[in-house]
Image: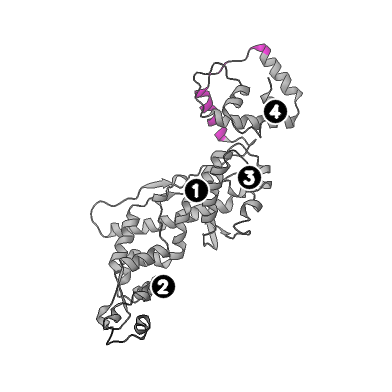
Amino acid sequence: NDLIDELIEDENQYPLLHFFNIITIHLGNPMDAFRAKLRITPNAHKVYPITIFLLQRYDDYTNIQYLYPIVMFTNYLIQKLNYRITRKNASKKTISEILFNDSDKEKTLKLYEYFIQAWYKLNFKEVRLGSQTITFENKYSLEDFAKKTEISKLLLNSSGDDNNSLLLVACLKTIAELQNDIVKHFHEIMNSNTMNKKLQPHVVSLQAVQKKHLFCIDQEFISRKLIDDGSIINYGYGKGKDIIYDYDEIEFMLRDKISCLPLIDTERLHFLNYQFELYAENTSMITDIRRRIEQKQLINKERIELENLIKKNSNDDILHYLGSLDYIFTYLRHFEYKNVSILTIKNFVEQYIDSKICLNDNLLRD
């Protein structure tokens, strides 16, 4: 009965009922109401410049929070597959065929899940790479993405005419530039209001970005902030359901968050190199190996035997050997040559390389 009486709003029995209009805030859309009120607030552009700036492209800026899991996964793929997959295989084989059959399947699946959830939450219709505009669309459902998408789509690569990762590169740079827009605008406002030393944001490389570096605010966060700290019921209206917003609280909260954010360097990216495709980085890789590994000149007899072996092999076999050596060199690059009495290719592969699936069988023979 008490519930029915409250719904009737009996003023004599419940004289204070009109003070409890919180349900209006929770059931409505706080963001829409906040925008509408701010739009008619006098001098809002001057008094609350950061809030106004963010609300103008709010839907775009919500994409920034998804940059970290995408970067984390693409970095992992470069580390895992650099020099270890051919361009042909990458363009023909799907994500699930390449990634989900290794010994580190559990780690790969975990990173992939973070990536795919972020990728499908992006609300772009198009992304930009320099002067080029690229349509952003997902051809497959989230569940079918790994089974139907070629792995090349996720391998950052700057070479070749068939650059399948163009959409991914454009997406990463577009998201990073959205944050750069916010950070630059914030510092322009702050520096225009002071005669002291100008504030300069620090810079973080795109592929080194961490979650703490990103502007991670969405509608749920703002709505919760409005309900908890940024609004009160206008009691002066008696039975009115008007809400008074604390614009200063929201403005200062946004400034505080942005003041700690870096600019993101989108120019210098570390790309994956396909197997058998020798680029400038191979020179530095071999130099790194020479610093770590003891080298001995072949005696004449061994040199002659090696030359004869090369002459007997077909071009395809030689290419396979070179690809296998590329693969082994990625391990040797970081190998500490200490307390190893005899280091041949065969015993190095057996002791230090877990996955041998793409190696030439002859390398493992005595």
| Residue type highlighted by circle 3 | Gly
Name which residue lies at 55% across and 18% down.
Answer: 295
| Residue type highlighted by circle 4 | Asp
Can you say whether 49 is above or below 262 in the image?
below
How far separated are the C-alphas under marks 2 and 4? 64 Å
Name which residue lies at 62% across and 54% down.
Answer: 145
Nearer the camera: disc 1 or disc 2: 2
Element assignment for label 4: helix
In-front residue for pair 124/16: 16
Which one is earlier in the sequence, the residue at label 1 or at label 3? 1
| Residue type highlighted by circle 1 | Val
Residue lying at the far left in this picture: please name it. 196
Instruction: Provide the residue designation for mark 1.
Output: 71
Q: Which mark is residue 160?
A: 3
How far separated are the C-alphas under marks 1 and 3? 22 Å
Which one is earlier in the sequence, the residue at label 3 or at label 2? 2
Instruction: Provide the residue designation for mark 2.
Output: 29
Name which residue lies at 67% across and 43% down.
Answer: 89
Query: Quarter holding the N terminus?
Result: bottom left
Q: Position of residue 256 (x, y in %)?
A: 31, 57
In-front residue for pair 17/335: 17
Which one is earlier in the sequence, the residue at label 1 or at label 4? 1
Q: Which mark is residue 361?
A: 4
Q: Within 10 Å of the Cα at label 2, are there few (<14), some (14-19), or many (20+) other Cα atoms?
A: few
**Disc 3 + disc 2, Cβ < 8 Å:** no
| Residue type highlighted by circle 2 | Asn
Q: Coloring scheme of the render?
A: one colour
Which contiguous range is marked in magenta? 280-301
How far separated are the C-alphas under marks 1 and 2? 32 Å
Compared across the picture, whether 338 is left or right of 347 comes to left
Which one is earlier in the sequence, the residue at label 2 or at label 4? 2
